[in-house]
Amino acid sequence: MPQNCWEVKQCGREPDGAKTLERGVCPAAAEARTNGINRGKNGGRCCWAVAGTLCGGKRQGIFAQKLSNCMKRDFYLPVMNEEGSGAAKKTAEILRMLQKEQALRSLHKVDGARAFAQS
Ligand code: SF4
């Protein structure tokens, strides 16, 4: 069974994890839009593509800001090796999907603000 990042790193930031009550659930463990990618639960096997994850007890940035750190750690490369060349393609697809949804959310906020201002 493929392991999710929280199982490998034992961070305790997954739902019902050892540190969740004290510190909250990591966005990777909660990101349902990426469920099943690389055979992981939520973002558990594509955490490098999820913005604002909590590795090292510190909020990480977006993909471009954290990829070099993820590549040095002991999870990214094993997943890439286990999933084969499709994993890199999937990362690009995940980013496009998450960015598209983010852009749509921003657009809705702007539209909502305009509608509020005009009312
Ligand atoms: S990405 Fe989040 S859930 Fe995964 S190991 Fe890092 S802190 Fe834990």
Image (tube, grey):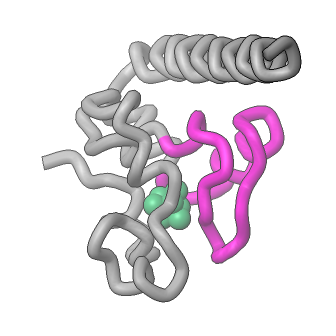
47, 23: nearer the viewer: 23
Q: Quadrant of residue 23?
A: bottom right
Residue 101 image offset from top left, x and y in percent: 58, 17
- Left or right? Give the position of 67 relative to 94: right
Q: Residue at 50% across / 60% down in the picture?
A: 26
Q: Does residue 48 appear anywhere in the picture?
A: yes
Quarter assignment of residue 15: bottom left
Count of numbered tags: 0
Quarter of the C terminus within the rendering: top right
Residue 108 covered by magenta stretch: no
Residue at the image position 43 percent from the left and 41 percent from the top = 31
Is 6 located above or below residue 12 in the figure? above
Of residue 89 and residue 94, the one placed in the foreground of this image is 94
**Stretch in magenta:** 47-75
Write the residue at 32% across / 30% down: 38
Residue 84 horizontal/vertical position (percent): 37, 22
Q: Is residue 74 visible?
A: no
Q: In the image shown, does 8 or 12 lie closer to the viewer?
A: 12
Q: Residue 65 in magenta?
A: yes
Residue 53 on image: x %, y %: 60, 55
In the image, residue 33 above or below residue 7: above
Residue 55 lies in quadrant: bottom right
- In the picture as drawn, the residue positioned furthest to the front comes out as 119
Q: Name the residue at 28% across, 40% down.
A: 40
Left or right of residue 22: residue 70: right
Q: Nearer the viewer, residue 85 or 4?
A: 4
Residue situated furthest right in the rendering:
117
Q: Position of residue 75 (x, y in %)?
A: 48, 53
